[in-house]
Image: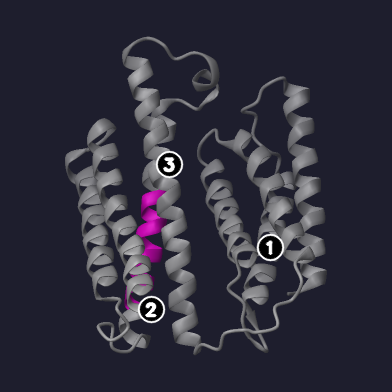
């Protein structure tokens, strides 16, 4: 991994967190937006994080797809999505969570000993693997967002929006964030499917056929959901059901692959 870039990213994340915390205290408002300086520092930190995470996975000696390396890349993706969304909606308080999380992941990646036995993939196959990981991660975030939205909607219907739920952004903001996550996840999933079709040879021989089928089915369900949102104005519980149904297909494909490979290797 690129140690210097990781150190710069960690330092910038800490500075951006401190600046946002200072603005929140000065305004006595947890939803106050970051100033241009804090935004620039956060964006630069994210760029350094992405570069460090990518260089930790794609090394000159091979690919290192360890849990820490993958989680660091996922963390950088989460920061990108949250930071982008906060430019348009009052989600700035979430930066106080994702910045420290990204810092911890970078530190863990920094302190993890280098792997001795690295995998060797072609650039195309490695890009397919990374895109698959990122798409699954973003769509998992969307499923979690849908569950939170479902609980928030249920409590609002029963006039019990108190405690932790009262600290969440309004339902309209949460719903808009849900669809932004789905859009990002669908784009990544599309790229993962395309690169898989181009670079992965003989899916049937590699016992990946059912994973491909479920991934395509999930892609179709997410695409229908986004189309229903734009054309028919789908929202609320309809959007939640479609999101969870599409995510269930992805989960079945992933778990099915694990079970199949485990049984076959016995």
Residue 223 on image: x %, y %: 24, 56
Residue at label 3? 144
Q: Which mark is residue 265?
A: 2
Q: What element carries label 3?
A: helix
Q: Which comes sooner in the sequence, label 1 or label 2?
A: 1
Q: Is residue 253 left or right of residue 165?
A: left
Q: In this view, does 89 lie to the left or right of 194?
A: right
Residue 19 on image: x %, y %: 78, 39
Image height check: is 24 above or below 250? above
Asked if labels 2 and 1 touch by Cβ distance under 8 angstroms, the answer is no
Q: What stretch of residues is rendered in magenta?
A: 181-194
Residue 118 on image: x %, y %: 62, 84
Between the residue at mark 3 and the residue at mark 2, the CA separation in whole angstroms equals 33 Å
Residue located 51% across and 87% down the image: 121
Between the residue at mark 1 and the residue at mark 3, the CA separation in whole angstroms equals 24 Å
Residue at label 1? 49
Q: Is mark 1 on a helix, strand or loop?
A: helix
Which mark's residue is nearer the viewer, 3 or 2? 2
| Pointer 1 local density, CA inside 10 Å: few below 14, some 14–19, many at least 20 | many
């Amino acid at each position: 991994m690129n140690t210097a870039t990781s150190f710069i990213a960690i330092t910038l994340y800490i500075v951006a967190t401190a600046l946002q915390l200072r603005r929140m205290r000065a305004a006595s408002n947890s939803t106050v937006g970051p100033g241009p300086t804090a935004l620039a520092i956060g964006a630069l930190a994210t760029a350094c994080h992405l570069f460090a995470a990518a260089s930790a996975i794609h090394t000159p000696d091979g690919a290192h797809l360890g849990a820490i390396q993958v989680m660091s890349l996922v963390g950088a993706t989460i920061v990108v999505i949250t930071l982008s969304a906060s430019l348009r909606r009052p989600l700035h308080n979430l930066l106080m969570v994702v910045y420290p999380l990204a810092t911890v992941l970078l530190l863990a990646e920094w302190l993890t000993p280098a792997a001795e036995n690295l995998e060797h993939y072609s650039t195309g196959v490695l890009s397919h693997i990374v895109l698959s990981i990122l798409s699954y991660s973003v769509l998992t975030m969307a499923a979690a967002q849908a569950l939170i939205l479902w609980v928030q909607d249920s409590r609002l219907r029963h006039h019990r929006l108190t405690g932790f739920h009262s600290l969440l952004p309004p339902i309209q903001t949460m719903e808009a964030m849900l669809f932004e996550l789905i859009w990002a996840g669908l784009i990544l999933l599309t790229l993962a499917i395309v690169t898989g079709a181009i670079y992965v040879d003989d899916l049937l021989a590699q016992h990946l056929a059912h994973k491909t089928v479920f991934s395509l089915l999930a892609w179709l369900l997410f695409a229908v959901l986004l189309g229903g949102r734009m054309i028919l104005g789908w929202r609320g519980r309809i959007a939640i059901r479609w999101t969870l149904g599409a995510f269930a297909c992805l989960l079945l494909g992933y778990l099915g692959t694990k079970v199949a490979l485990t049984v076959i290797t016995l």
